[in-house]
Amino acid sequence: MTTDLLHAFGHPHLRAGATAPDRLADRISLRDHIAEIEIGAFQQERGTTQRIRFNLVVEVARHDTGTDDDVDKILSYDTLTEAIAHELTAERLNLLETLAERVALRVLAAPQALRCFVRIEKLDRGPGALGVEIVRDRDDLPGAVADDAPQPHVVFLSNGALKSPLLGGWIDQLVAGSPAILCVDLPETVPPVSENLMAQRRINLLAMDQNAWVLAGQDRRCVVVGSRTEIDWALKHDVLTVWAPSKIVLDSVDPPSEGKRSGPALALWFAEQVGATSLLCIGGDGPGEPTLPDATVSVTLRPVDAAQLLDV
């Protein structure tokens, strides 16, 4: 078999390697991902489902993972599976070519993605697999692909709220409502004290991380998250989360000022970062002057009536 045929019928990673520039790019891949959907232009393909197999290879911008083991700086595998899932549920399609194009462009909307190889095959249309394979790069993007991640509510819970007998009722409402991310304050126990301001900043953030785990330990529906990758995944999968702030604050190029280190003020800063639609404060003194654009912001609630929470 000639080299051309090997590339034509081999896995997309062979084609990616054969057409790579002089400096080979890093790649991530998804192999043999199978979904059962209705697709096809022929009448006998309507009203019935068939198995479709996806193989993707994505060339990505280089990242020094040997020294920087940071999940937020790489292209997540979830980006590939979520691109497929999104396009499969968007509308019924006639052509594999259309589906491949849309999947490739959605993957390429991720900032780390450089080129995307997509192979899609029908497995039930004959004795063999019938398929299409395409390659697209960032120059093929028609414009920004819409981000389908929902916008969350951010809810600050004071230490008093964490001890309230109404906490379970508030969580019930949050689970049943729009996506929400919970924020907590410094614990009531005094954290260690350092004369070094940078060291004290880390100590305080780690103490808030610990308080987030305290809340998660009280209710198993609350999942602790510390990275943007985890937050984005949780929002798309309707998971109630508790923000552990140390990683995002310390990694931020525009961290909160020294005057915004209290729990409510830090929750406001975080709400701005994630594009929250609202910030609700239960207990505490509120974050001060709110600056969130286009949002219903900064309503301070006392833990007296669980029914108030989502009516704000």
Image (cartoon, rainbow, N blue to C red):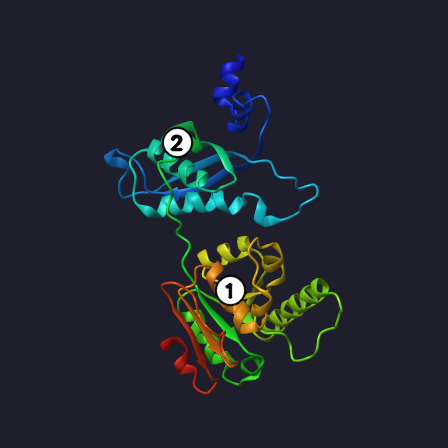
Residue positioned 53% across, 76% down in the render: 157
Q: Residues within 10 Å of mark 2 (few under 14, many from 20)?
A: few
Residue 118 position (above or below residue 298): above
Left/right placement of residue 56 relative to residue 65 reads left
Q: Identify the residue shown where x is 42% and y is 28%.
A: 134
The numbered mark at residue 219 is: none
Q: Please, what is the three-letter code of the amino acid marked with disc 2?
A: Asp
Label 2 with label 1: CB-CB less than 8 Å? no
Tell which of 273 and 65 is nearer to you: 273
Counting labels gives 2
Question: How far from the left and from the top, in percent, is residue 62?
Answer: 60, 36
Q: State the residue at coordinates (60%, 49%).
A: 71
Which of the image's four quarters has the C terminus? bottom left
Confirm whether residue 1 shows in the render: no
| Label annotation for residue 269 | 1
68 lies left or right of 273 = right
SS at circle 1: helix
Sequence-wise, the earlier of marks 2 and 1 is: 2
Q: Is residue 153 above or below residue 306?
A: above
Q: Residue furthest bottom?
A: 304
| Residue under label 2 | 140
